[in-house]
Image (cartoon, helix red, strand yellow):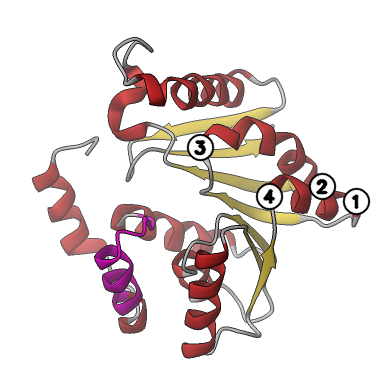
Amino acid sequence: MIIDERLSTYIDSISWNIPEYLKEVEKTALEKEVPIIRRSMQSLISFLLTTRKPKAILEIGTAVGFSSMLMSEYVSEKTTIDTIEKVPMRINDAKKNFKKYGKEKRINLIEGDALVELDRLVKDNKKYDFIFMDAAKGQYMNFLEYILKLLTDDGMLVTDNVLQDGDIIQSRYAVTRRDRTIHGRMREYLYYLTHSDNLSTVVLPVGDGVTLSTFR
């Protein structure tokens, strides 16, 4: 928890408001220990979508489909939503949820490795004005090259889980050995976003840390 837990609970109590079916999906996911976006992040995304009104959304990291279904609630029916997932078990869960809650035609699930699928989307000249990245943290830098080609000039890139429960401020030797690679890559990713001549980025202590990036 990046901010005080009591403060976070209070903020959620006055701002968190999602459809009942999504509360059911969240409950089931948490019971199965499937990570989904935190409630403060849910509120931020719903606000961003309501104000920006994107025409095309791309999500990297579908999991059980919670966040893509959430996004579908806050955009026009004409907004296209593509989401990428490679883990068979997660793909199966997402498909079940999309079918159960009538989202099969609303959300396009792209099955496969994100690097491969992002490259394909670039070659297909796809463009998105809202991209949400919530996938393998150690791969963010590798994804970024493709994402920036897919993002429209006025689009926004939203990246979740960038502060790693606060561990990002620790020395690499203070984190467990198994987490050092991801720790280093995330620091590299954050430095690039905040020092790029082509991007304007803000880092926010929302959820597990989020960046909002747009082209200058």
The quarter of the picture where the N terminus appears is top left
Dot 1 alpha-carbon crowd within 10 angstroms: few under 14, some 14 to 19, many 20 or more: few
Mark 3 or mark 4, earlier in chain: 4
Q: How many marks?
A: 4
Pointers 2 and 1 in contact (C-beta within 8 Å): yes
Between the residue at mark 2 and the residue at mark 3, the CA separation in whole angstroms equals 18 Å
Between the residue at mark 1 and the residue at mark 4, the CA separation in whole angstroms equals 14 Å
Q: Residue at x 31, y 15 (%)?
A: 170
Between the residue at mark 2 and the residue at mark 4, the CA separation in whole angstroms equals 8 Å
Relative image position of residue 132 (x, y in whole percent): 57, 52
Secondary structure found at label 1: helix
The residue that mark 1 highlights is: 123
Q: Amino acid at mark 2?
A: Asp
Is residue 158 left or right of 216 when viewed as pictured?
Answer: left
Mark 2 or mark 3, earlier in chain: 2
Between the residue at mark 3 and the residue at mark 1, the CA separation in whole angstroms equals 24 Å
Between the residue at mark 2 and the residue at mark 1, the CA separation in whole angstroms equals 6 Å
Q: Residue at x 49, y 61 (%)?
A: 63
Relative image position of residue 120 (x, y in whole percent): 84, 53
Mark 3 or mark 1, earlier in chain: 1
Which range is magenta? 23-37
Q: Amino acid at mark 4?
A: Ala
Pointers 2 and 3 in contact (C-beta within 8 Å): no
| Secondary structure mostly taken by the magenta-highlighted segment of the chain | helix
* Label disc, if present, on residue 114 of the rendered structure: 4
The residue that mark 2 highlights is: 119
Q: Nearer the viewer, residue 109 or 155?
A: 109
Whether residue 24 appears in magenta in the rendering, the answer is: yes
Q: Amino acid at mark 1?
A: Lys
